[in-house]
Amino acid sequence: MVRFKDVILTFFNNRWLVFVAAMWVQSCAGIGYLFGSISPVIKSSLNYNQKQVARLGVAKDLGDSVGFLAGSMSEILPLWALLLVGAIQNFVGYGWVWLVVTGRSPVLPLWVMCLLIFIGTNGETYFNTVALVSCVQNFPKSRGPIVGILKGFAGLSGAILTQIYALIKSPDKASLIFMVAVGPTMVAIALMFIVRPVGGHRQLRLSDRSSFSLIYCVCLVLAAYLMGVMLVEDLVDLNRTIVQILTSVLFVLLVVPIGIPLYLTFSSDSRPPEEEALLSEPQNKEQPGSSHDPNEIIFSEVEDEKPADVDLLPASERQKRILQLQSKLAQAAAEGAVRIKRRRGPHRGEDFDLTQALIKADFWLLFWTLLLGSGSGLTVIDNLGQMSESLGYDNTHIFVSMISIWNFLGRVGGGYVSEIVVRDHAYPRPVALAVAQGLMSIGHLFYAMGWPGAMYIGTLLIGLGYGAHWAIIPAAASELFGVKKFGALYNFLTLANPAGSLVFSGLIASYIYDSEAEKQAKERGELIVKSSSLLTKLFDTDDALKCTGSICFFLTFMIMSGLCIIALILSLILVRRTKTVYQNLYGKTRA
């Protein structure tokens, strides 16, 4: 009996169980991706026009991106309570919308409906925060893969929930809203005491590489499977039995990773006990803020005094030279020859709070490179339907499905590649971000040119590059500014996404599209009623004017390509500024 209790306790404290549970939570954390399926139901039931639906969409985007409250509360509440708050918001927001749409509640004013959509969608920011904070603390040496996989599952959640809804296939279209209100809420409540920090840095094993390989295989198979299922269901009218089989396979793929913590739990006795202590040892050495020794006090002086060529040396030789310089400085300080000044606040690589991070240039470099990179990518996602229509494609939603899959693979692949960069080469993670932004710049050029087949290539490059941002940026932020206040730091950075979308898509892209559409309308001799300002264009989505040809988005995507090049330059500046930090963080493990 005692042995059974020990096994259960070991299983529930296994960091891989936390990771798998976080993956399941994230599979429900992309509620915003379903808005395109929910909005027609709301529109028809409440007799909204397109302009009113667009305002609901703005509320959804704000709820999806404004996670500052979730980040702030993560410093006060335990993570299970944070997950519960998100579940309640999701249930109340979308549950009330369902009541209104089905006539079970009185019709509410538009602004109240916007508020409910905001509250419901904002619940997923709590899911994101809990999953990322827990797993980044449990896997401090695998932040890239962890963040990439978790953000990837959030990106796939729309496709996963859509497939589950296809299984229900209720004649009542409003049942999708009910599923969105109840499904994620039940999952979050069921897992809220599992997704938490469990001292994962003390659970390092030699089998971790194999475990990550299995997770990556599941991710690739899941992405390919969902792509295939979406294509088949779009082209063929499947009967209920086939849909049940397809959905059952989806559930099996989602459950497969639970085999990792089960295997580790029941095979733990076969591992030599000294192995975990040996692997855990570097963790204690790599926490520069844990004590105030002389090396920590004179860190800034070492940076000022060391020769420029030291950073070019191999890691072991570089470490030796820095230790010699530290020893000389300490001796000089003891003799009174130099004064050692203790820097106020943490160094990069230590734990920052948000106010300390906001005065650091590196933090703002991360913010602006995310705003330019992800903002230009979101411009593509928001306008993909109009872009494909203007180029003469009839089946526009195939590009929406494709970019969601490439986005998922970009998140998973971005985490994997950036982890190789930092772990095998002790080089700054943002260099992988620069590569992603270079790919996006090329993708925007393909869109601008409008060549035959360019939509497919552009969708591939933009999807991969945009997804990579959401694996690399959070991991880099946790490395440069610590994990203690990671929730607040991460959710502040996510504000760059709606800001970029508002300016690039809501203003620039829509203005240029309408201008080209007006020119074409004048050539056809049609009467044109112009909007009074850019801000009215932001909400004027009745689509009275249609633009055809590559000219509709040519200037927009030339601008987006230029913005990605600027983002690339900012990323390279960040690489140059943080070389020493990454060599201190990862150079010891390579040596």
Image (cartoon, helix red, strand yellow):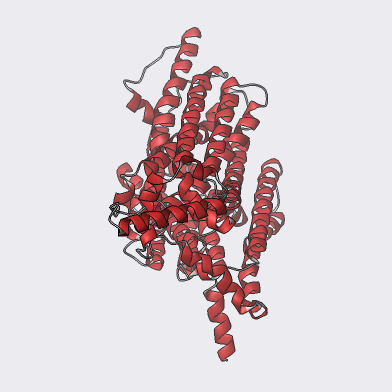
Give 571 or 560, whichever is nearer the viewer.
571
Residue 469, image x, y percentages: 51, 43
Q: Which residue does the image show at 62% across and 60% down from the upper left?
A: 254
Q: Nearer the viewer, residue 235 or 291?
A: 291
Question: How many labels sit on residues?
Answer: 0
Q: Position of residue 243 (x, y in %)?
A: 68, 54
- Spot occupied by residue 232 in the image (x, y as percentages of width and height): 70, 45
| Visible residue check, residue 100 | no
- Where residue 55 sits, quadrant-wise, is top left
Residue lying furthest bottom: 1
- Image quarter in which the N terminus is found: bottom right
- Name the quadrant of the C terminus: bottom right
Task: Name the side, left or right, on which 457 lies relative to 146.
Answer: right
Q: Quadrant of residue 14?
A: bottom right
Q: Residue at x 47, y 40 (%)?
A: 308
Rendered view: 521 above or below 568 = above
Q: Is residue 25 visible?
A: yes
Q: Is residue 572 above or below residue 557?
A: below
- From the top left corner, tell me how far across and down residue 197 is, in percent: 46, 67
Residue found at x 56% / y 32%? 438
> In front: 400, or 79?
79
Image vertical order of residue 420 relative to residue 371, above or below: below
